[in-house]
Image (spheres, rainbow, N blue to C red):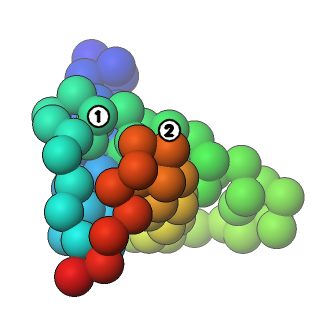
Amino acid sequence: MELLSWIIFGFFAGLVAKMLMPGRDPSGFIITVVLGIVGAVLGGEVAKVLNIGGGWWTSFFLAVIGAMILLGIYRLVRGNATVG
């Protein structure tokens, strides 16, 4: 059940990140979930380093920020770094 929760949480974090990032993004559902999950892990590690505690909203915010960073890197690697 915990894995399913991570997938759902990651999907929504990735979805919000895609909505906040301008430009076209050719990735589908799987990439969205992966970006969100990895973004959540990245955001959690940053929170540990900065000693930021918090609840669900803080975790979600950091997951979205992490997913946005990963989405930007993904677009650069894939050559889709268009704005607008």
Residue 68 % position (x, y): 44, 62
- Which of the two discs, 2 and 1, sits closer to the camera? 1
Neighbour tally class for label 1: few under 14, some 14-19, many 20 plus, Cα within 10 Å:
some
Q: Which mark is on residue 31?
A: 1
Coordinates of residue 4 in the picture (x, y in percent): 25, 23
Please tell me the numbered disc located at residue 38.
2
Quadrant for the N terminus, please: top left
**Of residues 1 and 37, which is closer to you in this image?**
37
On residue 52, which mark appears? none
Mark 2: secondary structure: helix
Residue plotted at (50% across, 38% down): 38
Query: Quick check: 24 above or below 7?
Result: below
Question: Element at badge 1?
Answer: helix
Q: Residue 9 is drawn in which quadrant?
A: top left
Which residue appears at 47% of the width and 60% of the height?
A: 72
Question: Visible in this render: residue 40?
Answer: no
Residue 3 appears in view: yes
